Image: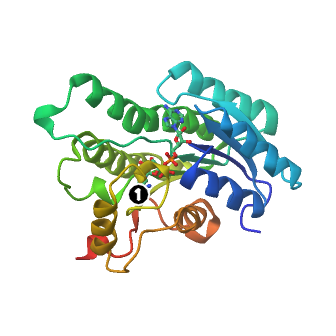
Amino acid sequence: MKLLNRVAVVTGGANGIGRCACQLFAEEGAKVVVADINESGKQVADELITHGFEAMYINVDVTEERNVQNLIRTTVDTFGKLDIMVANAGIAETIPIHQLSLENWNKTINVNLTGVFLTNKYAIEQMLDQGYGVIVNTASMLGHIGRNEVTSYTASKGGVANLTRTLAVTYSKKGIRVNAVCPGYIDTDLIRNKSAEMMEELIRLHPIGRLGKPEEVAKAMLFLASDDSSFICGTNLMVDGGFTAQ
Ligand SMILES: NC(=O)c1ccc[n+]([C@@H]2O[C@H](COP(=O)([O-])OP(=O)(O)OC[C@H]3O[C@@H](n4cnc5c(N)ncnc54)[C@H](O)[C@@H]3O)[C@@H](O)[C@H]2O)c1
């Protein structure tokens, strides 16, 4: 077991990639905090408990500072420490900038970038007290390349990618490793509102010839969260079926 007795928080743990990470981390021995704005996260935690794992749901809006402080405090009060923070909660939209309202821009930046700022900030505060910890942020391959009309999302994920590097540079000597996964298009609810033609196009754009599965991203998260990646910090790990290799 790669995460035996580690305590892991997964934001966006109620669905998609985060939900798979909660399941996989629990199977690898971690005590898992399913952190999500959606109350369905309670069901995810309950299912884990039913299968004999240690888990807990905490309702959190990652854009609310007090919520995030409460998340870290409750985790440490319950499980005694915080080994792993997976900052994964995110939203997506595709609107060209000339039609994008400031309100929509702010919404995406708040969840995808400020949410990562807050969860990393308060996780690192706790990890500094402990002298150890691992952070895995969910950026995106779209934090590294441009994409037609995907305005606020690409900007937010570019921010996550570079915030990850800076935090790694700042905190590695304090025993805290910070890395990011950068998924290609993954078959989750986040992209299911697209037309059949667009889905075909997205599949075609991945050299591997298909979309990714959330489990495949969760496995990359496990690698970065475990001691298997002990000399890796500040990296943005592409999990994109070769999309950005072209
Ligand atoms: N699916 C993809 O193609 C893809 C590609 C690259 C990156 N990503 C990133 O992966 C992460 C997970 O996405 P997913 O595909 O699993 O999507 P998803 O919609 O299935 O899951 C996202 C989860 O985040 C939660 N969430 C949203 N806003 C929140 C908030 N303010 N506070 C707390 N929780 C909140 C949702 O309730 C949901 O459970 C996101 O950061 C997303 O940007 C996804």
Using the rendered view, name the quadrant where residue 146 is placed: bottom left
Q: Percent from the top left, x then y, of residue 152?
A: 26, 39
Q: Is residue 111 left or right of residue 213?
A: left
Furthest-top residue in view? Answer: 66
Q: Quick one: label 1, few (<14), some, or many (20+) residues within 10 Å?
A: many
| Residue 175 visible | no
Using the rendered view, name the quadrant where residue 112 is placed: top left
Relative to 25, residue 99 above or below: above
Q: Is residue 116 left or right of residue 4?
A: left
Q: Percent from the top left, x then y, of residue 195?
A: 32, 55
Q: Percent from the top left, x then y, of residue 111?
A: 42, 33
**Residue at figure coordinates x 34%, y 51% from the top left:** 161
| Residue 215 visible | yes
Label 1 beta carbon less than 8 Å to ligand 1: no
State which quarter of the image contains the N terminus. bottom right
**Residue at figure coordinates x 81%, y 43% from the top left:** 46
Q: Percent from the top left, x then y, of residue 74?
A: 73, 28
Snapshot colouring: rainbow
Foreground of the two, 15 or 157 = 15
State which quarter of the image contains the C terminus. bottom left
Q: Label 1, on which residue? A: 234
**Residue at figure coordinates x 57%, y 62% from the top left:** 218
Q: Is residue 214 left or right of residue 3?
A: left
Under circle 1, the secondary element is loop
Foreground of the two, 229 or 186 = 186
Foreground of the two, 110 or 174 = 110
**Residue at figure coordinates x 58%, y 23% from the top left:** 67
Q: Amino acid at mark 1?
A: Gly
Using the rendered view, name the quadrant where residue 106 is placed: top left
Foreground of the two, 50 or 119 = 50
Furthest-bottom residue in view? Answer: 208
Q: How many marks?
A: 1
